[in-house]
Image: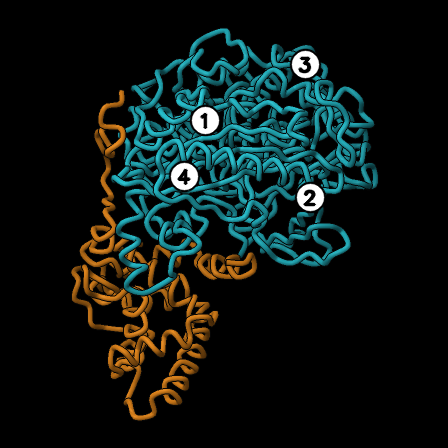
Amino acid sequence: MDLSRREWLLGSLTAGSFAEIAAAREHARKTVGGATTVHFEFFDAAMAADVEAIAAEILPSGDGPGAKETGVVYFIDRALHTFDAGQQNVYRAGMREIRETRQKLFPDAASIAALTADERLALVRAIADTDFFEVVRVHTLLGFLGNPSYGGNREKRGWSYIGFEDRMAWEPPFGYYDTEAK
Amino acid sequence: MNGRTFRLTEPVDFLVIGSGAAGGVVAKELSTAGFSVVVLEQGPYWRETDYSHDEIKYTFQAGLTNDTKLQPVTFRKNENEPAKELKAIEYGRQVGGGSVHFTANYWRFHESDFQERSLFGEIPGTSFADWPITYADLEPYYTKAEYDLGISGLAGANPFEAPRSKPYPLPPMRVKSSGALFERATKQLGLHPFPAPMAILSQPYQGRSACVNCGFCESFGCDMRAKSSTLVSVIPMAEKTGRCEIRPNSYVRKIVTDARGRATGAVYFDAKRREALQRAKAVVVCANGVESAKLLLLSKSNQFPNGLANSSGLVGKNLMWDNGSFASALFEHPLNEFKGIQVTRLIHDYYRADPKRGFYGGGGIDARFNFYPAGFALFGMPPDAPKWGAEYKKMLATYFVRTMSMLAHSTSLPMEKNTVTLDPEKRDAWGLPAVRITYDPHPDDIANMKWLLEREYEIFEAMGAKKMWAQPVEMFSTNRHLMGTCRMGADPKKSVVNPYSRTHDVRNLFVVDGSNFVTCARQQPTATIQALAYRAADYMTRTAKAGELG
C-alpha cells in the first residue's frame, strides 16, 4: 500500500475523540448485550443488507465464521455514528457507486444482497481496486477482529477463528518452539 | 492526584515540562532532593485501571499518543517541497509519556556510541560528531535508572555490552517461541543471542507485581503495573515527597523570561483551554525530541528573536528517529506470539559500524511479536497474499499464530537539514503553529537498512522459516524515538545544551530528553534518555544548592 493511501486509512480511523469512543462503548453495552441486535442507526435495512453482502465476500462464511456470523455490519453501522462518523458521506457515495455498478453488471437483480454467489464475487472483483472498497475492507477486518465491545466479533468468533484469545494472563510454554526452553 | 498542589503565583523551585521517560525521572530526583516541583503534562492522568486490551482504541485511534486531529503535523522531505499534513511522528501524550505505551526495550548505549565520529571519521553531508560525554560518565546513571524503574535482563549475556557496575535488578523475562527459534538459529550462525533487557518486571519489585504475560505491551498501557513506566515507578515516588505536583492537561505554549534573560516560568493552556502562568525559579523542558524544540521556537521574544536558547541556530535541527528493517516469517507450528511480552531475544553482533561494509551503519536485531489481530489482518500478511476472500480468510487462520517478526534497530544520521520547525500556516486546536517535520534519510541509513534486512533473512532461513517477507525499507511510516533537536555539546556555537543538559544561553533553563542526543546509536533511546535525566538532575541539584541558577 502506498504511503498516502495507508495514511489516509489510518487517519480516517482516528476521527474519534475519547468522549466519542466512550459513548460508543456505552452504546455497545446498551444496544448489544448479546449477539442478536437487529437495530441499525445509520444504515436502513436495504443498505445494511448490501453492505453485509460485500463484507461477506471479504470474509466469507464457510470454513468457520465470516463477516455475517461475527456481526461485522453492526460494527460498521456503529462506527459510522460514533468514532468514524466522519465517513458517513464516504459510505453514502461509495455505496451509491457500487449500486450503480451492480445495476450495470446485473440489471435484473433487485439488489446487491439479492445477487447469486457468483454474481456477488464478480461485482466485488469489479470494485476491488477502489478506495471505497479499501474502507469497507478495513472496517470489515476491524469488525471481525476488533474488541467485541464495538459490536462486531460476536462471541469472539473472529478471534477464535484465527487462534487468538484475550486473557489477562498466560503461562508458558506459549507456543510449540518454547516448550523445552527455560 | 496524590501530591500537593501549588499556587501559580508562588514560584516553585523547578518547573518541569513533560512527564515522560525524562520528566518523570527529573521530578522524582528534584523532589526527593528537597525542591518544590510542578510538572506540566499536555495529556491526561490515567491509571492502570483506565487501560484495556482494546486494539481499536490503542493502535488505530492514538489512544495513548498525539492525536493529529487536535495537533496536526505536516511533513516534507526537503525544504523545496510543500509540507503536507501527515502523521510523521508519534509520541506518548499522558502522564508517563511514551514510557507508558512503549515496547519496553531497554538497551544501554555501547561505549563506541559516544565516540563514533572519532572512530569512523567524517561522513559528508552530516553533522556526525562525538558526544561531549563518555559511557563512563553515564554508567552510574544507567545503573540508577535500572534500579529505580525495575529492569529485567542478564548482565554479561551480551558479549558486546559496555562494562556495568551492577547486574540488572531482575532476572530476564521468560523466552517465547520467537526467542527460542532465534536463539537456536543465531547460535548456529556463530552469533551471540542474549535475553532482551526489558523495562518489565520478571518478579515482583518495589510493591509492583510481576508480568503475567498477557501480551499487551506495545501501544498499550500495562494494566498490571508490570511495565516499568515512569507513571508507576518514579512519579509515585515524587508525589510521595509532598513536594511535587503533577498537573495534567496542561499544554505549555511559552517559556517566559525576565529582563536578565532568565526563565521565570511558563504560560500554558489548562484543561479548559484557559491560559495560566506558573512561576518558577528554574525550568526543565522534557517534552520529547520534537515538542521540546517546538516549545523553544515558540518561546521567542525581543531578547531571543530566533527562539529561546537558540543562539546556535540549532534548535530543531539534526532530527533523528527510529529507522529500522522489519521482516516477518511463517513457521510450521503455532508460535502463539500474542502470549507474553513482545521481545525476548536479540543480537548485537551487527551493532558496531564497520567501514568494510561500504557505508556507516549497524544495528541490533530482535525477535518479536508485532501485530495484534486486526493489525495483523491489515498489515501483517505477506505482500503477495490476497487481500480478501476465502483464501485470504483461510490464510489468516494459518498465519496469525504461526508468524513472528524481526526488527533491526538501525541508524539515523544527524543532518542539519532534517528539522522540526513551526508550520507557517497550519495551526493546532489551541491556535498554536503545527509542527512541521522535514526529514530525508541519509543514503547510508538506507543502505544499512537493506543490509540488515539481508541479515534477518539469513537468520529466518537458519530458523527453518517456510516463508519470509518484508515491506521495502524505504516505505515511510509514522516515526517514534525522536532525537537530536537540542543537541548536547561543549561549544555553544555548535550545540544547544551543555554536557549536563543546561542550555548554553539561559543558565536556569534545562532541556533533557531525546533531543540532547548527538548521534542516535541504534535508536533504542529510552535507557539513555533516563540516564541523561538522572545525570542532569544531579547537576541541577548541585547548581541550585550552590546558588548558581539565579
* Earlier residue among tags 3 and 2: 2
Using the rendered image of the protein, determine whether residue B10 is visible from the camera's viewpoint: no
Q: Residue at x 44, y 30 (%)?
A: B366
Q: Which residue is mark 4?
A: B405
SS under mark 3? helix
Separation of marks 4 and 2 at Cα, in angstroms: 31 Å
- Quarter holding residue A87: bottom left
Q: Which label number is shown at residue B235?
A: 1
How many dots with numbers? Answer: 4
Question: Of circles 3 and 2, which is in front?
Answer: 2
Q: Is residue B141 above or below residue A1?
A: above
Q: Earlier in the sequence, mark 3 or mark 1?
A: 1
User: On what subunit does the disc labeled 1 rest?
Assistant: B
Separation (CA) of disc 2 from disc 1: 29 Å
Pointer 1 and pointer 4 on the same chain: yes
> Which chain does cyan denote in the image?
B
Q: Name the spot of residue B46 as percent of width and height, x first.
A: 40, 39
Calculate the distance from the C-alpha at mark 3 to the C-alpha at mark 1: 23 Å
Tell me the tag on residue B543. 3
Q: Amino acid at mark 4?
A: Ser
Q: Are marks 3 and 1 on the same chain?
A: yes
Q: Nearer the viewer, mark 4 or mark 2?
A: 4
Element under label 4? strand
In what quadrant of the picture does the N terminus of chain B appear? top left
Which is closer to the viewer, label 2 or label 1?
2
- Give the chain letter for orange: A
Q: Is residue A38 above or below residue B529?
A: below
